[in-house]
Amino acid sequence: MCIGIPSRVLSVNGQLACVDSFGQQREVSLLLLDEPVNVGDYLLVQVGGFAVSRMSAEDAEASLSAMQALLNGDLPDDLIADADLPSAMRYSEVSK
Protein backbone atom coordinates (compact mmCIF):
# COMPACT_ATOMS: atom_id res chain seq x y z
CA MET A 1 0.00 0.00 0.00
CA CYS A 2 1.24 3.48 -0.83
CA ILE A 3 0.46 6.61 1.11
CA GLY A 4 -0.29 9.78 -0.82
CA ILE A 5 -0.95 13.19 0.66
CA PRO A 6 -2.86 15.93 -1.19
CA SER A 7 -0.58 18.96 -1.45
CA ARG A 8 -1.07 22.45 -2.89
CA VAL A 9 1.56 23.76 -5.31
CA LEU A 10 3.27 26.94 -4.11
CA SER A 11 5.89 27.24 -6.87
CA VAL A 12 7.20 25.33 -9.86
CA ASN A 13 10.82 25.21 -11.00
CA GLY A 14 11.29 22.84 -13.93
CA GLN A 15 10.67 19.28 -12.76
CA LEU A 16 10.41 20.30 -9.10
CA ALA A 17 7.61 21.96 -7.16
CA CYS A 18 7.37 23.41 -3.69
CA VAL A 19 4.14 22.15 -2.12
CA ASP A 20 2.25 22.68 1.12
CA SER A 21 0.35 20.10 3.10
CA PHE A 22 -0.84 20.61 6.67
CA GLY A 23 1.33 23.73 6.90
CA GLN A 24 4.50 21.86 5.98
CA GLN A 25 6.35 22.88 2.84
CA ARG A 26 8.61 20.58 0.87
CA GLU A 27 10.07 20.07 -2.56
CA VAL A 28 8.68 17.24 -4.69
CA SER A 29 9.56 15.76 -8.05
CA LEU A 30 7.20 16.19 -11.00
CA LEU A 31 8.95 13.59 -13.17
CA LEU A 32 6.07 11.09 -12.96
CA LEU A 33 3.44 13.55 -14.22
CA ASP A 34 2.52 13.81 -17.88
CA GLU A 35 0.70 17.14 -17.68
CA PRO A 36 1.74 20.68 -16.76
CA VAL A 37 1.51 21.82 -13.15
CA ASN A 38 0.64 25.35 -12.08
CA VAL A 39 0.76 27.27 -8.82
CA GLY A 40 -2.44 26.55 -6.90
CA ASP A 41 -2.91 23.05 -8.34
CA TYR A 42 -3.32 20.11 -5.97
CA LEU A 43 -1.10 17.07 -6.37
CA LEU A 44 -1.20 13.64 -4.80
CA VAL A 45 2.32 13.27 -3.39
CA GLN A 46 3.78 9.92 -2.36
CA VAL A 47 5.76 9.70 0.84
CA GLY A 48 8.96 9.36 -1.21
CA GLY A 49 8.55 12.89 -2.57
CA PHE A 50 7.10 12.17 -6.01
CA ALA A 51 3.90 13.76 -7.27
CA VAL A 52 1.91 10.96 -8.89
CA SER A 53 -1.21 12.79 -10.09
CA ARG A 54 -3.12 16.04 -10.13
CA MET A 55 -6.39 16.20 -8.23
CA SER A 56 -9.30 18.57 -8.05
CA ALA A 57 -9.41 21.14 -5.27
CA GLU A 58 -12.67 19.57 -4.04
CA ASP A 59 -11.17 16.07 -3.78
CA ALA A 60 -8.02 17.42 -2.14
CA GLU A 61 -9.95 19.41 0.46
CA ALA A 62 -12.20 16.43 1.25
CA SER A 63 -9.17 14.16 1.68
CA LEU A 64 -7.32 16.69 3.81
CA SER A 65 -10.39 17.19 6.01
CA ALA A 66 -10.75 13.44 6.54
CA MET A 67 -7.03 13.11 7.32
CA GLN A 68 -7.20 15.98 9.82
CA ALA A 69 -10.23 14.40 11.48
CA LEU A 70 -8.34 11.11 11.75
CA LEU A 71 -5.35 12.88 13.30
CA ASN A 72 -7.72 14.54 15.78
CA GLY A 73 -9.27 11.18 16.64
CA ASP A 74 -12.77 12.24 15.64
CA LEU A 75 -13.31 10.63 12.26
CA PRO A 76 -17.06 10.27 11.68
CA ASP A 77 -18.21 6.73 10.91
CA ASP A 78 -19.85 7.82 7.67
CA LEU A 79 -16.45 8.76 6.18
CA ILE A 80 -15.19 5.19 6.49
CA ALA A 81 -18.41 3.18 6.43
CA ASP A 82 -17.78 1.90 2.90
CA ALA A 83 -14.01 1.59 3.09
CA ASP A 84 -12.47 -1.63 1.80
CA LEU A 85 -10.70 -3.36 4.65
CA PRO A 86 -7.70 -5.67 4.11
CA SER A 87 -9.79 -8.59 5.34
CA ALA A 88 -12.45 -7.83 2.69
CA MET A 89 -14.94 -7.26 5.52
CA ARG A 90 -17.12 -4.18 5.56
CA TYR A 91 -16.76 -1.57 8.31
CA SER A 92 -20.29 -2.29 9.51
CA GLU A 93 -19.32 -5.94 10.11
CA VAL A 94 -16.27 -5.15 12.24
CA SER A 95 -17.61 -2.11 14.09
CA LYS A 96 -20.19 -4.08 16.09
Image (cartoon, rainbow, N blue to C red):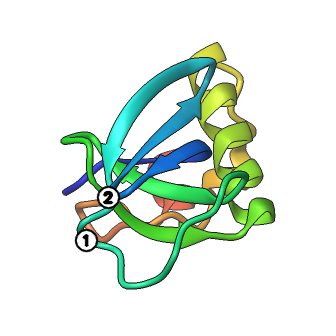
Q: Which residue is mark 2?
A: 15
Which image quarter: residue 22? top right
On screen, residue 35 versus residue 29, left or right, reads: right
Seen from the viewer's position, the closer of residues 44 and 73 is 44
Residue at left offset 64%, top offset 50%: 63
Q: Residue 92 placed where, x, y %?
A: 57, 58
Q: Residue 81 placed where, x, y %?
A: 63, 59
Q: Is residue 21 visible?
A: yes
Q: Are marks 2 and 1 in contact (CB under 8 Å)?
A: no
On screen, residue 77 versus residue 86, left or right, reads: right
Residue at left offset 59%, top offset 35%: 67
Q: Which mark is residue 32?
A: 1
Q: Quadrant of the C terminus?
A: top right
Residue at left offset 63%, top offset 62%: 38
Asked which secondary structure carries label 1, the reply is loop
Q: Which mark is residue 7?
A: none
